[in-house]
Structure formats: structure tokens, C-alpha cells
Image (tube, grey):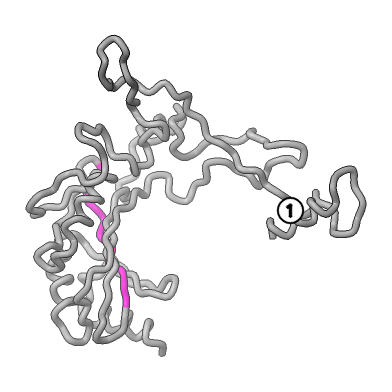
């Protein structure tokens, strides 16, 4: 058994029903727990020598709205242009997105989560801890500052960008956006062009805010298909060398 799978089994044995799920993904153990168990489990992960996760490397928020859906189905694009005959299914300041997010989601769907990346120097191990907020409209999870003091600014960042509230944080303020900023820019339903823009008003002789005037749109990247590009050495109407280079870069 590898060290990673041994750690996963050890976590399952130690915390039992407190763990909602345990998985090994991309070379690390990912554990999901309920918000009510967060501080107890986090303290044990830090203090018990079998784990020794004394360092919080990072804390980030996640918005799972429309999780697993692509903006454009580019696999159906034609060889003669950039096909846009698809349905936009994620956030792009489009009406269809607003309509989808307004639809009541099933009770088992959870939208906001906080993810903690932990490091044990003593045991040379890493793991992830994930906690879902029980309420999508007002996402709240406990602050882990009493366990890892380095979580202070990380939690402020997750609050600023995702609107996740951390109960018990001593100074939960925005940390990246401007004063008076409205909304949370990393949420999937936040418009890509923003809500307001800044301009200089010549009459007032000062900078003012106004509703954004940028037309929202989603750009589709060019998709190069090997079937539509001649192989190196073949002649075509275009520059063979350039096309061969494009094929190599695409691969």
C-alpha cells in the first residue's frame, strides 16, 4: 500500500463517521467533512503526531454552480469557421445563465465550498480538506484561525471573491477588490464585464462610476483539427511549412 492510500485508510479509521468522503485524487488525499466537525478534525490533524499537519499551505473558495459544463461545445465546430451554433451553459452575462441560476436546485446540490491544503513537514505528507457551506444563499463555514493562524488573509480572500462567510474570523473584510465593490467576482453568476466602470467626468472634473457599457460576449478560441491540416510535405493552397508548424503546436 502506498503512503497516500495508507494515509487515506488512517484518516478513515481515526475519524470514522466524521468524514463524509475520503478519496485519492491527483496524488493527494481529499477528505470532505461537515462544517460542524471542521474545528475538531482540524485540531486533531494538527496536533496528533500520526498526522502532524501543522501548516496550512492555502485556503480557497469554490463555486460549483454549473459544475462540469462547458461554455461552448467546440468539438462540434465546423472546419470552415468558428461555429457558434451551441447553447451557452455557464456564466457569460447571458440571459440563459441568469435563468438557469434562478431555477431552484435540488436539495442535494451544494454550491459553495472551502478547500484547505495542508502540509505535514514531520511526516512529509500533504492532504486536502473540503467543507461545503450548508446554505447557498448565505454560505457560512467556521473560521480555522484558532487552528492555523495563517488562514486570516486566505479567509478574507475567499470572502471577497466568493462571498463565503467565516464564522469567528476577527476581521472579515474585503482584501482584493476596491472600496464599495458590489458582488463577488469569482461567483459563476457574476457578469464577466462587471457591474460598473470608472470614467473621468470632464464636467465634474473627477472620476465617477457608471453602469458598465461594454457589450458582454464570450469569445470562442480557434480549434485546429489534424484532419483539416495537411501533413508535413504535402502541398496545399496555403503555406505548407506554416500549417505543419501549426499542427505540431496543436498536438
Which image quarter is the N terminus in? bottom left
Most extreme residue toward the top is: 203
* Residue at 73% across, 60% down: 248
Q: Residue at x 27, y 71 (%)?
A: 118
Residue at the disc numbered 1: 246
Residue 132 position within the rendered picture, expressed as x and y whole percent measured from the top left? 26, 56
Farthest residue, direction right:
235
- Provide the secondary structure element on which disc 1 rests: helix
Provide residue 167's location: percent of width, then percent of height: 11, 52
**Which quarter of the picture shows residue 8?**
bottom left
In this picture, is 38 found above or below 242?
A: below
| Residue 135 shows in this picture | no
| Location of residue 80 by image quarter | top right
Query: In this rendering, does residue 92 appear at all?
Result: yes
- Frontmost residue, 78 versus 8: 78
Q: Is residue 251 left or right of residue 217?
A: right
Residue 212 lies left or right of residue 140; in this view the side is right
Q: Is residue 218 above or below residue 205?
A: below
Q: Is residue 237 above or below residue 52?
A: above
Residue 28 x/y as whole percent: 38, 74
Q: Residue at x 68, y 37 (%)?
A: 82
Image x and y of residue 143, in percent: 14, 58
The answer to which quarter of the image holds residue 13 is: bottom left
Magenta stretch: includes residue 31: no
Q: How many marks?
A: 1
For the C terminus, the image quarter is: bottom right
Magenta region: which residues?
126-136
Residue at (79% x, 51% y) in the render = 243
Amino acid at each position: 500500500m502506498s503512503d497516500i492510500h495508507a494515509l487515506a485508510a488512517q484518516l478513515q479509521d481515526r475519524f470514522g463517521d466524521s468524514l463524509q468522503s475520503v478519496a485519492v485524487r491527483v496524488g493527494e488525499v481529499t477528505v470532505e467533512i461537515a462544517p460542524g466537525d471542521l474545528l475538531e478534525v482540524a485540531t486533531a490533524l494538527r496536533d496528533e503526531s500520526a498526522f502532524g499537519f501543522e501548516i496550512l499551505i492555502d485556503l480557497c473558495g469554490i463555486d460549483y454552480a454549473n459544475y462540469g459544463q462547458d461554455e461552448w461545445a467546440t468539438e462540434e465546430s465546423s472546419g470552415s469557421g468558428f461555429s457558434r451554433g451551441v447553447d451557452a451553459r455557464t456564466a457569460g452575462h447571458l440571459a440563459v445563465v441568469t435563468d438557469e441560476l434562478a431555477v431552484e436546485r435540488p436539495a442535494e446540490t451544494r454550491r459553495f465550498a472551502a478547500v484547505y491544503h495542508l502540509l505535514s513537514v514531520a511526516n512529509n505528507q500533504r492532504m486536502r480538506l473540503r467543507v461545503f457551506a450548508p446554505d447557498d444563499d448565505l454560505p457560512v463555514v467556521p473560521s480555522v484561525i484558532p487552528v492555523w493562524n495563517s488562514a486570516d488573509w486566505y479567509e478574507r480572500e475567499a470572502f471577497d471573491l466568493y462571498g463565503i462567510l467565516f464564522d469567528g474570523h476577527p476581521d472579515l473584510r474585503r482584501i482584493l477588490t476596491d472600496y464599495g465593490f458590489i458582488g463577488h467576482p469569482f461567483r459563476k453568476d457574476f457578469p464577466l464585464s462587471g457591474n460598473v466602470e470608472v470614467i473621468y467626468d470632464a464636467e465634474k472634473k473627477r472620476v465617477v462610476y457608471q453602469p458598465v457599457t461594454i457589450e458582454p460576449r464570450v469569445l470562442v478560441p480557434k480549434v485546429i483539427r489534424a484532419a483539416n491540416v495537411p501533413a508535413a510535405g504535402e502541398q496545399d493552397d496555403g503555406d505548407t511549412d506554416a500549417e505543419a508548424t501549426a499542427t505540431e503546436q496543436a498536438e
